[in-house]
Amino acid sequence: MQTDHFDTDVLIIGTGPTGATAALALATYGINAHMVSRTNWLADTPRAHITNQRTMEVFRALDIEEELYRHATPWDQMGDSLFTTSLAGEELARLRCWGTGDARKGDYLSGSPCELLDIPQPIVEPVIFKNALERGARAAFNTEYVSHIQDDEGVSVTLRDLIQNREYVLRARYLIGADGARSRVAQDIDLPIEGHHGRAGTIYVNFRADLSKYVEHRPSILHWIVSPHASFGEIGMGLLRAVKPWNEWIAGWGFDISKGDPELIDSELTERVRLLTGVPDLEIEIITKSIWYVNQAYATEYSRGRVFCGGDAVHRHPPSSGLGLNTCVQDAFNLAWKIAAVIKGDAKADLLETYTQERAPVGKQIVLRANQSRLDYGALHKAFRVEGAENPVVAGIERLKSPTPEGEAAREALNQALELKNTEFNAQGVEMNQRYHSSAIDESEESEEIWDKDRQLYLKATTRPGAKLPHAWLIDAKGMRVSTLDLVKGYGFTLITGLSGTAWDMALKSIDKPCLRLLQVGDVIKDPYCEWQRRREIPESGALLVRPDGYVAWRCMEAVQDATEATQRLEQALDSILLQ
């Protein structure tokens, strides 16, 4: 077999959040990427929608953040989560969500330069995809993955053109399987999957109807309906989710999976939507209707040789906690720079093994978290019901409003149940506290990390290796405010030191490695707020080595003034993280 010709550097199966982000990042780094999809276009249903701060940081690093802001429901419109008897009916409770409440907003603002957004998948995917193509990536739709054969130098992938019904082979250095929860690539490389599928079932109806009368005065993209008409299933409540405020929605409710898939009849679905909205004569246009099952499965390995999988191919879970698209994007961002570094000759091929080491634990974490978030609705379900009553939900609502000891106990139970849901709706820690432990992280001089607050709820900003670089506002040469994250974006490693860290500048010059650059805070870039000084956790003449994905790879916790010592320390660090 001829192995000295490649049709592309990286072939990507799938054009969803994982595939498109991988292509965008690779193209940004100057690597040839080619995407294929068996479908005719991108996402056609508004599945994922919550885009968290870490994912927005990825999009900021890839220079598409501002474009997404223009298309999204902004942070201040995402609002509380409401619990009502119907959209037009009685309101029972509210939960401040996504850091918009007074008690948490400061945490979110200080933790990142980015806001959260609500942007449905059919909107976010085209933005990522378009930018990938504009930067040089290629794509082919109506093209199906068939099989692949890999060798020491590359991967030969057989594809099928579904329009002409012909097969052909593309040769690539690497293959990425971003082909979803039924990934054929993951099957072909026999990735081990733990957990189980089909734990519970949900019906979704995507519909158009003007419901602004019931929402505009209390903006909220998520409404939970406590009603006898939606009191079944694992969550025990109905859902109304705004897709495009306030005239496109998703209605959702659970069903008994032991009875098989229910028949989706438009007239019956329309009646159910009317019951959930509380508007008996509501005119609706059904866009799509679907059934999906709750999965709890994750891969323990993400690659075999030159073939890698990411996104839903390796972690499958419900949308609770809004972690799906976010984790897909972050998988791709982690993998892309590593492939680029190896192709460019800036890193050893062993670096690619750290993709599994770093992302598989995250995948397992978010699968368990998303499923736990569903189970945590049990306390709310219980607070809204009186078991054994003729109509448990009606009796439960009456009890909540009752000026009796039983009513008081029910209201306290509701309070505790709402508090528990902060681990889904105000979980900045879940979204931002990911820690990497791999051979691309040098933790040799680090002690065990101590968490002083709830790790799920609160972000702990730190410069310790394996953590995301903390955000701090600095001032550039034009007097403009700039985040620390903005100063490390793009391909390459950034060595951060302070004004007295001249030894590190000399060390970089002596090593002369093109993928390394210096950021000396206090020189051209100023720290007038002293935010960075308070967050850097190293002396001014110490140093941080930050990877292209914004994660700290190594740090020197000691003041270093001697260039020879700085060079020796830096060379050892580069060798330990596979860059030498």
Image (cartoon, rainbow, N blue to C red):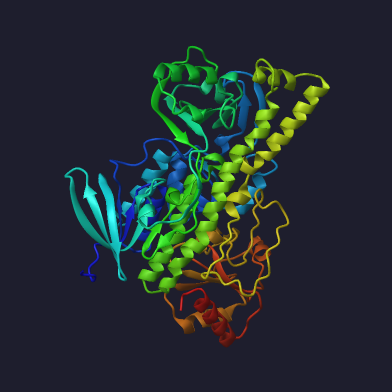
Judge left or right: residue 270 versus residue 519.
left
Pick the residue in front: 392 or 94.
392
Image quarter of the N terminus: bottom left
Q: Residue at x 19, y 55 (%)?
A: 168
Pick the residue in front: 379 or 319.
379
Please determine whether, in this image, residue 373 is positioned above or below residue 131. above
Judge left or right: residue 203 versus residue 407.
left
Residue 89 lies, in percent from the top left, at: 60, 18
Q: Residue at x 48, y 84 (%)?
A: 510
Please determine whether, in this image, residue 65 is positioned above or below residue 474. above
Residue 76 lies, in percent from the top left, at: 57, 37
In the image as oriented, which residue stretches furthest toward the front?
A: 258
Judge left or right: residue 206 versus residue 472.
left
Kindly tell me whether residue 221 is visible in this rendering: yes
Kindly tell me whether residue 140 is visible in this rendering: no
Pick the residue in front: 332 or 133.
332
Residue 461 lies, in percent from the top left, at: 64, 58
Snapshot quadrant of residue 88: top right
Residue 279 lies, in percent from the top left, at: 52, 15
Q: Residue at x 64, y 66 (%)?
A: 536
Please determine whether, in this image, residue 112 is positioned above or below residue 281. below
Total numbered labels placed on residues in the image: 0
Snapshot quadrant of residue 228: top right
Please determine whether, in this image, residue 417 is positioned above or below residue 148. above
Q: Residue at x 70, y 42 (%)?
A: 103
